Amino acid sequence: MLGQRPNPSELTAETWDLIVIGGGITGAGVLLEAARRGQRVLLVEQRDFAWGTSSRSSKMVHGGLRYLGQGDIRLTRHSLLERERLLQELPDMVVRQPYIFPVRRGKFPGRWPMKAVLWLYDFLAGIRDHRWLSMDKLMQLVPGLNSNGLVGAMRYTDSLTDDSRLVARVLHEGCGHGGRACNYVEVGKIQRDGDVLQLSATDLISGAALSFRTRHVINATGAWADRLSGTEKKVRPQRGSHLFVAAERLQVSDCLTILHPDDGRPVFVFPWEGRTCIGTTDLDHRDDLSFEPVCTRAEVDYLLKLANSQFPQVALQDSDIISTMAGVRPIIASGKGIDPSKERRDHAVWSHDGVTTVSGGKLTTFRLIALDALLAAGLIEASDHRANQTPKERMFHFAVNPPHRLGHPLAALPSGNALLDQVRWVLDNEMVVHLDDLLLRRTRIGNLLEQGGKAVLGDIKSLCQQQLGWNGAQWDAEVSRYLQIVERYYSVPQANNSVADAA
Ligand SMILES: Cc1cc2nc3c(=O)[nH]c(=O)nc-3n(C[C@H](O)[C@H](O)[C@H](O)COP(=O)(O)OP(=O)(O)OC[C@H]3O[C@@H](n4cnc5c(N)ncnc54)[C@H](O)[C@@H]3O)c2cc1C
């Protein structure tokens, strides 16, 4: 299990087989695959686990219809097989969900092209789970959907998860196999010292300078990968944002895939942990990566326009938005300067002077990405890599039993004692350092409740103080830090804060 935060200085005593830099889904996957092969492996994360992109995705464990549309059959097939595996192995966390693609007269793609694509999609996954919905059936399933030009819809299935809970689950598993992980350790520099690599790092909690020794390094820092790869820049950071709105205002029971009226990009409207989520946008991200990304005013307007074009009677507005969430996708640039949406979503692995860098790809395919990185680092044989593309054995062995469906993508946030049970369990087991670790990533209180859950802070105060040893002043400082983060990075931007880029 992940457990409590170790003293990072104690982790500098040994020479590791492998140090993984980056505690998103990619790094967690590498930790797991290396640790279960008996390697001595340590993962370090500069902020909190899943603080980067892996808590800010569209939460879909999916093949990705758009990738099939782009002709990327290999990526789609791999993703679909991984989806099926995760559905079987983590049924409380990865959940099959109906998706609906409304078809409108004269708009591409129509019923038959969609049917052909979905036939292939299901075939690649080894399932058969799509059908045409008549207008009557569609309006029963999605009441209030704009019927203008609508002729019916294709219904198929994919799946949903809670991305940051998935990262925690993979970290638990990796630590169960003997791997170690530590958050708030930022790596600054990697230097070769004979056969060994030396990592200079900082413990961001104590401020102490740290020096780690390891035989291999995998740089799994996603959008930040260029900082440590030692090679020319390869990553084109792209921002995608989401809105969370009250389900009472916009109720959907299935995931809708809607083409945006402005540019025809597919945007999802889907149920998630008791709220309705709308996203995503897709824009070049030019802001400083040292700060959390922000959903801009232009993106809010773009997403509201999408929702209101489909549900005109709902007329969503700013006051319906509970929170916003922006993430930065590490896209491996084609160098052709094409539209961000058209860049390939595949991952890339490259090595330089003992450092193997892995970036790009998807949440869904983290296990395969990890195997590619380990192969490139020379830590697994080609035969092991090949055999594990479609292995028979399970990936998850250890029991991790969080209370009250924590991490179930369709379970609403509980209240009262049930919420306190979740908080207590997380504080006991999941290396919480700051209040935002607890409220924005281990639980989703900060995304799902107004003002980041300000109203429940009083309820969880004594638990946090007891479990984390915070005195009154420390609690106050944590609350103030947390509310600032919510205000700056997760709230609705005002009109005059608008950034020039349009979605
Ligand atoms: C809007 C959006 C929607 C998406 N939707 C989906 C989806 O529905 N399904 C899907 O499969 N995929 C989706 N993706 C893609 C997926 O989320 C990403 O591919 C994945 O999360 C990347 O994980 P990662 O571990 O490589 O990067 P990250 O999660 O960003 O992790 C990298 C970590 O490295 C840390 N780090 C950086 N520098 C240092 C350093 N010097 N020292 C220590 N640590 C460091 C960072 O803090 C960060 O936590 C989406 C992406 C976006 C942006």
Image: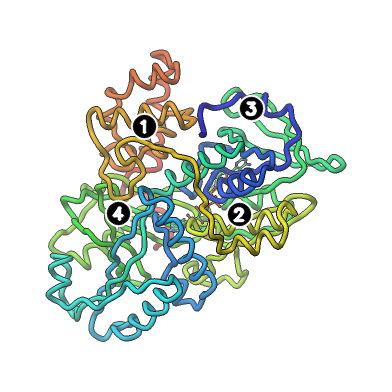
Q: Earlier along the polypeptide chain: callout 2 or callout 1?
A: 2
Q: Earlier along the polypeptide chain: callout 3 or callout 4?
A: 3
Residue linked to disc 1: 483
Please, what secondary structure does the residue beneath circle 1 have?
helix
Please, what secondary structure does the residue beneath circle 2 have?
helix
Q: Earlier along the polypeptide chain: callout 2 or callout 3?
A: 3
Residue linked to disc 3: 8
Image check: 380 left or right of 86? Answer: right
Q: Residues within 10 Å of mark 3 (few under 14, many from 20)?
A: many
Residue linked to disc 4: 277
Q: Residue at x 37, y 38 (%)?
A: 443
Q: Residue at x 56, y 42 (%)?
A: 174
Q: Quadrant of residue 177?
A: top right
Residue linked to disc 2: 370
Q: Earlier along the polypeptide chain: callout 1 or callout 3?
A: 3
The location of residue 333, given as percent across then percent down, is 60, 65
Image check: 79 left or right of 178? Answer: left
The location of residue 111, given as percent across then percent down, is 28, 83
The location of residue 392, given as percent across then percent down, is 53, 60
Q: Can you tell which of label 4 and label 2 is closer to the viewer?
A: 2
For the residues labelled 2 and 1, say whether their Cβ atoms are less than 8 Å apart: no
Q: Residues within 10 Å of mark 4 (few under 14, many from 20)?
A: many
